[in-house]
Image: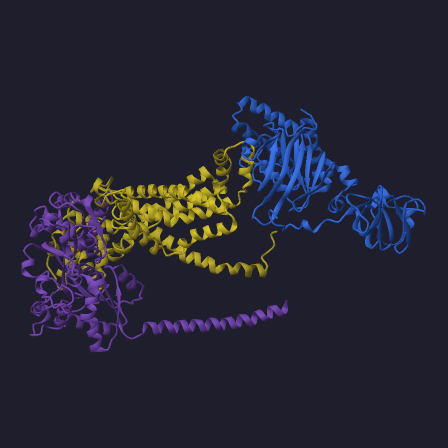
Chain colours: A purple, B blue, C yellow
Amino acid sequence: MMGNRGDWRVLARNQERVLFAVFVTALAVGTSGCGSEGITVVSWGGSYEAAARKALFEPFTAETGIAVHVESYNGGLAQIRAQVETGNVHWDVVDLEFADAVKGCDEGLLELIDIDELPPAPDGTPARDDYFEGTYSECGGGMVYYSTAYAYNRESFPGERPSTIEDFFDLAKFPGRRGMRRVPLVNLEMALMADGVPTEEVYAVLSTSEGVDRAFRKLDTIKAEVVWWEAGAQPPQMLADQEVVMSTAYNGRIFNAQVLEGQPFTIVWDGQLLDYGQAAIVAGTPRLEAAKQFLMFASRVESIAEIGRYIAYSPTRRSGMSLISTHAETGVEMRPHMPSAPENLTRALRNDAVWWTNHAEELTERFSAWLAR
Amino acid sequence: MADTGTETHVEFRGVSKTYDGRTMVVRDLDLSVRKGEFFTLLGPSGSGKTTCLMMLAGFEVPTAGEISIDGRPVQNIPPRKRGIGVVFQNYALFPHMTVRRNLAFPLEVRGVPADQQSERIQRVLEIVRLEGFEGRRPSELSGGQQQRVAIARALVFEPNLVLMDEPLGALDRRLREEMQFEIRRIQQDLGVTVVYVTHDQQEAMSMSSRVAVFHHGRVQQVAEPEVLYEEPEREFVAGFIGDNNIFRGRITSVGRGICEVETPDGIVKAFPVGECRPGQDAVLAIRPERVGLAKPGLFSNEFEARVDGILFIGDHLRLRLNLCGNSDFIVKIPNIVGHGALLTGDRVSVGWAVTDCRALPLDGLEESPEAELGA
Amino acid sequence: MARPLSGARLRAAALTLPLLAFVAVTFMAPLGSMLVRSFYEPHVADALPQTLESLRAWDGSSVPDENTFRILATELRLLDQQRKLGGVATRINRLEGGMRSAIMDTARALRDAEPDSWREAMTAADPAWGTEEAWRAVRRAGERYTMRHYLNALDLDRDPSGNIVAQSPERRIYLPLLLRTLGVSLAITVICLILGYPVAYLIANASPGRSNLLLLLVLVPFWTSLLVRTTSWIVLLQNQGVVNDLLVAVGVIGDDGRLALVYNMVGTLVAMTQVLLPFMILPLYAVMRSISPTYLRAASSLGATFPQGFVRVYWPQSLPGVAAGSLLVFILSIGYYITPALVGGRTGQLISNMIAYHMQESLNWGLAAALGVILLVTVMSLYLVYNRLVGIERMRLS
């Protein structure tokens, strides 16, 4: 017995040593993981991320030698909030929807960036004047315009084809299933436009409870035929499978399906909702300098315009408009595919990010209740 | 009802059973059980006796041969229509039902009216002496009581054939003896035919009208208990039933009712059973209590031997001798005056009557269980 | 018996400490914090202490005095400098839509201002400050202890005079969803039982070799990633999926009459049943294996047909397994959220999807916590009722 106990003590001492060694090793590995070279940039996956990779990440690394690790997410502030609040920030730069950028900036989740710090236009115009109005926040500037419009598969409509936002809500004229994103955003605005509300009054109408009722009533008319999507890659797939005859979609994804895959899709620009994304730095990142370097690189007019050579998203800076050229791989002229092309803007609504920060929560609950019925 | 006659109740004819097509569990079995008989299938575990019972109950199908009850083949009759009461090894009382509901079960599924049900339940509970236990669940009963309920349940729908599969195996010794009497009493009172399976030869001897001894899937001998004891016909039976001194020798001559067998200690005179010819090897069997210590001239078989061990039992002594090539030759002698003086190492003279020593043919090698089907 | 603990026993007890600590840290603490969050919301109270103090005397019938405006403006400016205003604004906005931008715009407008009338300056920045509703929202958001998450989670609301009233029908969401969740869980439990019982019976009564094989067939999907299984159901059930293709090929349905089998309640039921089936089969199997086949033999020897023997003898004895499996499946399905999120579409969502939404997207953790507490209480009351009916001591897992 005594011998055993003695052995135990020796063993215990050894165990302590082993544990200590393991602990130290873990610490070393952990810190080395944190201190590894490069920054983590979070994007949206799919063809947009692929475009950003070619237009931004690779040129940035080539220029600065700073590696870019890319992660994908589906939007929202939850992960950023978790990282900031636990003090364990491993995302450095995130490509955000503008409403989230505003909200995250207000809540201190993003680093403040003075607009005057951002690179000026090639002709020397300061960034403040070069950005389109309302496309920058206190935490940085917008990158590209994108649009949610609806598209259809030409094979589904051998005869008359839809051409207006009213057609999307007209089951009698164009029967068949529709794809829509499972959020109130965009859908409520489109419903009101289809119901005859002029674009400039949409948000005013939506601010009243009667207006919200009216939007939901309009959605009720097609509810039974709607297939709800969540990821941006779904609509082109559903259209290709003819799971739906038309679907709202991000215009860039449809463009890529048209140009790269030769899909017989047509975008109906009437009633499109323009929105823009913004890259921002997560507050408290230990790699602030490198992240800032990236942000400055990504905010250059040339960089923003370069994205437009891979996907049909147009610059949020005035000086970028003249840089829109052709698709990098197919040589297709990009201008007519851009949501901001004048012929596509006959009836277009700009998403009001601030309005949505006020009403998103309430309307999402209402929308969920409506969906579940 | 108690017509313990000669009428055949159950008959096995050429019945064989194999599960895997190679190993024969029961081989070419012929048996006939008479009406009102207490018939026991006795044998060590794996000898095929339970399989026979299960085939009779209808839970197993014979591979070959035919079983008939009251002269009618039962092959195509499902168990529930055979009208046989079965007492299972672990009773198989339904644990979620009270005693009453266990007993009512066979009556309910037969559609017996409710008033008759309670009457019959009452009667059968009287028979097994368990009045007043109707409301208990099996788990609230002792082993013996559970046993009685199992018997009652097998009797309550008044079958005239009851099968019992090692029903006393789970009971302690004292209870087992008590239940042996009970079962026998009930069987005699009701006059039902009982086919009973056990591996306990004492149980078989004390309860049965007739016993079939099983070994390696074959019946070795079917006989009344006394006959099995006194006149075993096979080496296995001689060794399995009661104590026996068994040893080997070579037959030198055969006469009427007597033969001479050569053993290492000399010629033994014995009663020949079955085919005995001079020159054959034979097995000799002599019961320990039939061997006496005696003065010379009293027995026709007389030998001298050294006492290797003495065991004091109480009412008798067991002596271990080295005799006739058998180093473990047992002699049982009554504990009477004079025998107390025996000591290990003493040389004694022992002897026995010719008729008490049976010369049996050797059990053949064809008894191996791996014999092929239909060979 | 009551000997003092010896050193050895103390050491043995100490060995359980890691587990206790683990349970405390990973289970009790989050549960407790969830409970607390559902009624305790200190953020606004901590952020605007002086404003709330000043509003205490306010009668609510007209807009507060200039002093209160000044105090609020001061506190808003301070929060703006500390970049803490967004969270406060979000919380007040939950009580009165539009307050978020009212607060943010006001703070920006007042950044370097020193106006004569704070009231005028703030009302100019956002007219909401001229309404009692805005101030009432500030005061209510400042309640440290609040029932509003529970009211919200029960589809109740307060009218302007503070009475509890039911939400308007088109805004009711949580109670119908809770009822649907219970209904779906019950349906899944019943389907699992109907499908799982024969399988468990087969496994329990097969020869050892075959029963091992069958058990493996039950367990292999159990070991497969939940996501893989759920997405393969999408492949099978979607409009152009295997099942529909097969039905069209056989001619049961026409090509234009393809069935909607996924992204609806059917999808949720099918996928969750498949995911949860092992939780039914395994307890059933464990109990059935302990039921000797002799009972069924005994029943048939007593004259019962197989159905009679099964219903009256086997089924009652298998009830402990039925009880255990049903409880397991029911409780698991009440809390399921990945599968309905992936295949539930519009109509196949459950209450846990709403909880996840408030945890991950709206970040209204108080409401998520209240929903969680209500779900927990519901499950526990159902469990008590179930215990009364079935008796938990009769339930066995093996």
- x, y percentage for residue A251? 14, 59
Q: Please indicate whether residue B258 sits to the left or right of residue C249 in the image.
A: right
Q: Position of residue C372 (x, y in %)?
A: 34, 49
Residue A110, visible in the rendered structure? yes
Residue B168 lies in quadrant: top right
Residue B113's x, y, as percent? 53, 22
Please state which of residues B325 and A235 is positioned toward the viewer in this rendering.
B325
Judging depth in this view, the residue of A81 and B42 nearest the camera is B42
Above or below, C140 relative to A9: above
Say left or right for B1 vs C185: right
Nearest to the observer: residue C180 or residue C31: C180
Give left or right: position of A11 versus C138: right
The residue positioned 63% from the left and 70% from the top of the image is A3
Q: Is residue C120 visible?
A: no
Q: Does residue A172 appear left or right of residue B265 in this picture?
A: left
Q: Tell me the quadrant of the picture where the N terminus of chain B can be found.
A: top right
